[in-house]
Amino acid sequence: MLNEQQIREILAHELFSGKMPSEFIDFCLAHGRIRHYAPKQYLYFSGDEGNTVYFLITGGIRLYLMGEFSEKILRVLRPPVFFPEVVLDGKPYPHAALCIEETEVLAIDRQTFVRFIESNPSVLWIFYQGLALDLRRSYRQLRNLSLGDARLRLGAKIFALAYVHGKPSLNGVLITIPLSATELAGMCSLARESVSRILGELKELKIIEIEKKTITVPDLKNLRSWIHKRAAHSSSSIG
């Protein structure tokens, strides 16, 4: 469990690239409440009233779109990050948030948070930059999901995960979130069997290494080259 000074350091130096003014950090600590969640515990469900905004301090969270018979993984969150930005409009949560490990969040009442932003418009530009980055990620995800080639879709997702959640290791770039074939299938809108088969192909080509739920990319340039070649092949097949 982190103490207040440790949380202040995270908010001041890591959140929004350390751009937030000290008044914002003071506000968050004064009005926020630390909440602890266990693995597989939900913060909220799609359709719940969007009364609270969160800062992820430790742990990890998956955002899901949940249907009657299926669910789609929208994004995996790692600290520090503010979410869900979309409920600043006062409408219900559009997705569910599930903790994937022991997690700590700083929770703030949405109306209190909005009043602070309205009184301190200088922070709006910093929020806008963060929202723009998230929107770009969403566009990229939609583009990748529109690809008809299952191998290209999965390869692009692995590259994106390595870029966002990758950490240098002795064997290459380690994706720091554990990923099963089922979870990757949910991210890519593919069948689990297809994902398992493609992962095996990529492993055989030495483009990735797999140890249980851990994926390592030995060379991102090789993965990028494979994606580009696959995209060119897919385009020529369509033509």
Image (tube, rainbow, N blue to C red):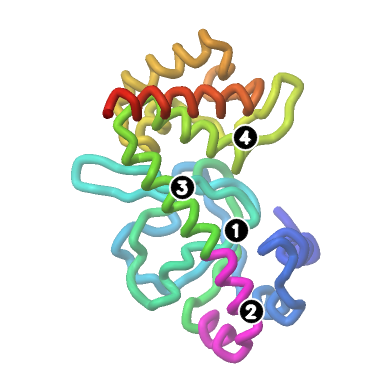
User: As shown in the figure, which amino acid type bears the numbered disc 2?
Assistant: Val
Mark whose residue sits in front, 1 or 2: 2
**Disc 2: which residue:** 123
189 on left or right of 206: left
User: As shown in the figure, which amino acid type bears the numbered disc 1?
Assistant: Val
Q: Is residue 124 above or below residue 118?
A: above
Magenta stretch: give its range.
112-131
Check contact, mark 1 vs mark 4: CB within 8 A: no
CA separation, marks 4 and 3? Answer: 14 Å
Is 119 in the magenta? yes
CA separation, marks 3 and 1? Answer: 12 Å
CA separation, marks 1 and 2? Answer: 15 Å
CA separation, marks 3 and 2? Answer: 25 Å
x, y percent for residue 214? 57, 24
161 on left or right of 72: right
SS assignment for the magenta stretch, majority: helix
Pointer 3: residues within 10 angstroms few (<14), some, or many (20+)? some
**Disc 4: which residue:** 176
Image quadrant where residue 18 sits: bottom right
Q: Residue at x 72, y 78 (%)?
A: 26
**Disc 3: which residue:** 75
Q: Which of the labelled discs sits on residue 81, or is there none?
A: 1
Pointer 1: residues within 10 angstroms few (<14), some, or many (20+)? some
